[in-house]
Amino acid sequence: MYTDAMARAFHSLRDHAPKGFSLQVIDHDNFLTVKASEKNFFGLTTDERVMAITYMVKVKKALEANGAIVLLVREGGEE
């Protein structure tokens, strides 16, 4: 399901991510999961956190514009 067009759209947005923040795209048969590390997120300043959230939304929209169903999730943190 993760097509070349989706990969290009995802990678074209790298410059919108704050330094040290990254997302992982996981390909499932019928949808994609975009996973962020909570540990990396909470290591950011307030402005960088806003930038990270904006980046996540842009990635989600770019993937959806290329035909994907996208689920945003976080990894880590205390239960």
Image: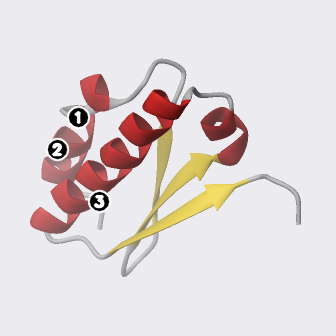
**Image coordinates for residue 32, horizontal then vertical, percent:** 40, 67
Q: State the CA–CA distance, disc 2 to disc 1.
A: 7 Å
Task: Name the residue tied to disc 1.
Answer: 13
Q: Position of residue 33 (x, y in %)?
A: 47, 65
| Residue at figure coordinates x 26%, y 23% from the top left | 15
Mark number, residue 59: none
Q: Is residue 48 visible?
A: yes
Q: Residues within 10 Å of mark 1 (few under 14, many from 20)?
A: some
Q: Which residue is mark 3?
A: 60
Expressed as whole percent of the image width and height from the top left, the position of residue 39 reads 73, 39
**Which element carries disc 3, helix, strand or loop?**
helix
The image's mark for residue 9 is: 2
Tell me if label 2 and label 1 are in contact, CB under 8 Å. yes
Amino acid of disc 2: Ala
Query: Marks 3 and 1, Cα distance to the nearest angstrom?
Result: 11 Å
Looking at the figure, which quarter contains the N terminus? bottom left
**Is 35 left, or right, of 52 in this rendering?**
right
Q: Residue furthest top?
A: 19
Query: Which residue sits furthest right?
Result: 79
> How far apart are the two marked residues, 2 and 3, measured between alpha carbons?
10 Å
